[in-house]
Image: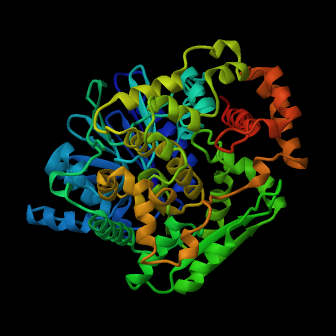
Amino acid sequence: MCGICGVLNYGSVESDETSCDTVEKMTRLLAARGPDAKGLFMQGGAAFGHRRLKIFDLSEKSQQPLIDNNLGLAIVYNGAIYNYRELRRELEGLGYAFFSDGDTEVLLKAYHAWGSDAVKRLNGMFAFAIRHRDSGKVVIGRDRLGIKPLYYSVQPNRVSFASTLPALLVQKDLDREIDPVALHYYMTFHSVVPAPHTIIKGVRKLPPGTLMTIAPDGEITLSPYWELRFGPLEEERSYDIEDWRSRLRRELEKAVQRRLTADVPVGVLLSGGLDSSLVVGLLAEAGQSNLNTFSIGFESAGGERGDEFQYSDRIAEHFGTVHHRIEVGSGEVLPAMESCISAMSEPMVSHDCIGFFLLSKAVSRHVKVVQSGQGADEVFAGYHWYPPMMNADDPAAQYGRVFFDGPHTAFTEAVDPRFHREDYSRAFVRKHFAEGGAESPVDKALRLDTTVMLIDDPVKRVDNMTMAWGLEARVPFLDHELVEFAARIPAEYKLADGGKGILKALGREVIPSEVIDRPKGYFPVPALKYFRGEYLDFVREILSAPKVRRKAVFNPAYVDMVLTDPDAHITPLRGARLWQMALLGHWMTLHNI
């Protein structure tokens, strides 16, 4: 796991020295993602930067940027290829020799052997850039489910890229204006801003499952290489529930085992819910001993409990893990908030962010890699909005009613009139639901959530908050082979038992039932929903600050109304409109947007 960046010049607009200086600045901003080593590379108008977190091949042989002069290729890469050893053996059979023992060199030589099709052989999470020495062509890629981020900007005669959006802001000529489409998504689509948009006009993000080829003259071509399709294969049409559950167990066991691939110990973030508990249980059944597990809890507020220790403690005791319970007092959250927001590549309104941020800080003192249960709800239909979709006459409208933070009129009431344009969020959902490859309303919603919402909310949140402390998070429920299999399982098996039915049935074979038969939980930080005392003062100070007011994103009368009665403005998905506005304002101020 690492941080990557680069600047590619076409023409004579900038000198090589200027590009190298820009990349050096970017690399410094990526230091937290890779605290173990730094590398720079410059050649023929291109400059690459890398920050390394040593997980595979702890020697200097896998230092990046990695250059193979015999092949005429250079690479910077962020991620983990779990099947790299199998690929290496295959490549050795083709005559390739290796000088390192990590996955970076395997990725580079796989690209040389199979070209763009190499990405279809990879099982893992990745974002990379590969440059051809002799032609100057560059190929940039992102994994199928967007677990690893990749941002880029395009200017006359220059393309730049980085693992985080703020790293690109070292370029003074970027357009820092708010993207009105992204603002609508942020305020309506529960802060989900689908690729290629970001909150500012001058930076885009590479869509998941996509390759971007930059020709020697700077021409850009985007090529999707993966698509998630729903419905069983022909040979699976006769499966009953037992067949599906048996296959699911094998697929999940493989996904969990793959994510143990490392040259350092691997722990687990244990919330005490079904998903993370199942990861712990399967690892224990596979013989993992002395497994480090980590849970976090916050003080209660507004009558809402701030921890789920009763469940995480039960799992840790049942499987005999080395458990770490992290308790966060009310006085610890606000002092960490600015650092947490600064670590966000894009504004992320979920108060899970501060939970993951503080949890990752503590976990990074013990291990460098953890597995997480992220993604199971989107893949196996764990959310409350899926059952009503079964018989929806207008599934796109039904989805919007339960997932969106409000109607288009609520958006126009909240923001400055210059942003009063189209209802971009509903148009996006309607377009997505109209595409082929998912026939039932439930499958359409699952596809949208798995390939869009999941990537630009929970997955991004976990990546940003863990990497802020040099911690690599692995997500077995987003193993692409498991996700493809889950998409083929009939929706009624996933919706059973109040949601995630088939996963719960598997869970009953592995973990204590009281962890399964309980209300759905999450990382609760009640003080960021029910604003009182110093928390209310904190957001009032942000929204009243001249810097935020001058940005004129929000309607001042609306801001004052929400500040007067914050509890009256809780979104359908239990978020606070007040925090949504304050977070965006503070993030923009921190990054001079």
Instruction: Name the foreground residue: 527 vs 168.
Output: 527
Residue 297 position, x and y percent, is: 71, 66
Instruction: Say which residue appears at 16% left-offset and 68% top-offset.
Output: 89
When the figure is inspected, residue 86 is found, relative to residue 313, above or below; the finding is: above
Instruction: Say which residue appears at 61% left-offset and 45% top-offset.
Output: 344
Residue 309 lies in quadrant? bottom right
Q: Report how many numbered discs are placed on residues in the image.
A: 0
Residue 408 lies in quadrant? top right
Instruction: Say which residue appears at 84% left-offset and 43% top-offset.
Output: 538
Name the quarter where the N terminus is drawn. Answer: bottom left
Name the quarter where the C terminus is drawn. Answer: top right
Residue 6 lies in quadrant? top left
Q: Is residue 77 visible?
A: no
- Hey, which residue is sitting farthest right in the picture? 533
The answer to whether residue 189 is left or right of residue 570 is: left
Instruction: Name the foreground residue: 409 vs 185.
Output: 409
Q: Is residue 340 visible?
A: yes
When the figure is inspected, residue 177 is found, relative to residue 137, above or below; the finding is: above
Residue 398 position, x and y percent, is: 51, 33
Residue 564 position, x and y percent, is: 88, 32
The answer to whether residue 529 is left or right of residue 90 is: right
Instruction: Say which residue appears at 84% left-offset and 47% top-offset.
Output: 535
- Hey, which residue is sitting farthest left in the picture? 94
Instruction: Name the foreground residue: 123 vs 308.
Output: 308
